[in-house]
């Protein structure tokens, strides 16, 4: 089996220690962190998602896989730095209220941080009030929201409205993303930006800060 197949299998089996072992092995084989992420960890989680949808895997299996994936991300995290000068622009990020999916959000947070931003990660199930309070307290320039459930997407609209109602809309730009989120939805709810993936989110953060 190739190192990628081993890595994918270890995530799917929820074998955290094996995921760490194979992620390290891949790095030693001079495979880039980006490739390990895309062709190993994310690929595995997509297969898990499909199997979950088909009823072949259940919530605990998905949780174990998610934990293994998180462990793999920690192994490659130090290799995501770009060496750019820190912008010092503060970014508040979180998964919106009612939603506990954290991996995609953490990935975006990690990559945005690696590109020179000061990231305040509020975690998951973050209320509109918490986003507003943190943006205000830290004079954040960007508020980034993730949602993985169609049922939690309205919480993004609620947060954007809360930012506006608090008089922060001219001071902070908003970015939304996550598997069910679309560009049209982002436009409809008045977000300043949308990205389908983590690298797009980084590019967007840079352009919104400079523009
Ligand atoms: Co859940 N889950 N889950 N889940 N889960 C999905 C999302 C689902 C698509 C599975 C399926 O049915 N195929 C489905 C949602 C259907 C829908 O609404 N459209 C679903 C469901 C239904 C549920 C529950 C309701 C299941 C239940 O209890 N019956 C429940 C809800 C809990 C809740 O939140 N209230 C639930 C629970 C869970 C677990 C807790 C078991 C676990 C999360 C554990 C954790 O995060 N610690 C889990 C997982 C792991 C998944 C899947 C399998 C994988 C998600 C993931 O981590 N992907 C997922 C199926 C799938 O996506 N294939 C599924 C890897 C990650 C790197 O990708 O998060 O998409 P992703 O992030 C990407 C992009 O979306 C983007 O960049 C990232 C990197 O490219 N992105 C952004 C994300 N945020 C961004 C923000 C940005 C920009 C880009 O800017 C701000």
Image (tube, grey):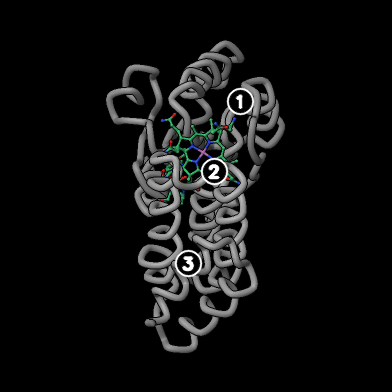
Where disc 2 sits, the SS reads loop
The quarter of the rendered structure image containing the C terminus is top left
**Mark 3 vs ligand 1: CB below 8 Å:** no
Eye-nearest disc, 3 or 2: 2
* Residue at horizontal 55 percent and vertical 20 percent from the top: 159
Q: Earlier in the sequence, mark 1 or mark 2?
A: 2
Residue under numbered circle 1? 97
Eye-nearest disc, 1 or 2: 2
Residue 64 in percent (x, y) is at 61, 54
* Residue at horizontal 57 percent and vertical 11 percent from the top: 165
Q: CA distance from mark 3 to mark 2?
A: 42 Å
Residue under numbered circle 2? 58
Q: Residue furthest front?
A: 56
Residue 117 in percent (x, y) is at 54, 53
Residue under numbered circle 3? 84
Of residues 202 and 169, the one drawn nearer to the viewer in this rendering: 202
Residue 100 in percent (x, y) is at 61, 36
Q: Is residue 95 left or right of residue 43?
A: right
Of residues 166 and 44, the one drawn nearer to the viewer in this rendering: 44
Residue 194 in percent (x, y) is at 36, 35
Q: Quadrant of residue 72?
A: bottom right
Q: CA distance from mark 1 to mark 2?
A: 23 Å
Where disc 1 sits, the SS reads loop
Eye-nearest disc, 3 or 1: 1
* Residue at horizontal 33 percent and vertical 23 percent from the top: 185
Q: Is residue 9 above or below residue 57?
A: below
Q: Earlier in the sequence, mark 3 or mark 2?
A: 2
* Residue at horizontal 39 percent and vertical 54 percent from the top: 47
Q: CA distance from mark 3 to mark 1?
A: 33 Å
Q: Residue furthest left?
A: 184
């Amino acid at each position: 089996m190739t190192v990628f197949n081993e890595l994918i299998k270890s995530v799917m089996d929820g074998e955290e220690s094996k995921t760490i072992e194979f992620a390290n092995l891949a790095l030693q084989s001079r495979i880039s962190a980006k490739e390990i992420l895309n062709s190993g960890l994310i690929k595995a989680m997509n297969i898990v998602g499909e199997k979950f949808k088909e009823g072949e895997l259940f919530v605990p299996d998905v949780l174990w896989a998610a934990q293994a994936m998180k462990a793999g991300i920690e192994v490659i995290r130090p290799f995501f730095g770009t060496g750019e000068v820190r912008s010092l622009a503060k970014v508040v990020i979180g998964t919106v209220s009612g939603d506990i999916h954290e991996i995609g959000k953490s990935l975006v947070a990690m990559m945005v941080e690696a590109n020179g931003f000061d990231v305040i990660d509020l975690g998951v199930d973050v209320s509109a009030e918490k986003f507003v309070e943190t943006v205000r307290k830290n004079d954040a320039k960007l508020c980034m929201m993730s949602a993985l459930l169609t049922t939690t997407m309205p919480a993004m609209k609620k947060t954007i409205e809360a930012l506006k109602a608090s008089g922060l809309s001219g001071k902070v730009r908003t970015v939304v993303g996550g598997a069910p989120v679309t560009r049209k939805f982002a436009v409809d709810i008045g977000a300043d930006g949308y990205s389908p993936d983590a690298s797009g989110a980084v590019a967007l953060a840079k352009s919104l800060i400079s523009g």
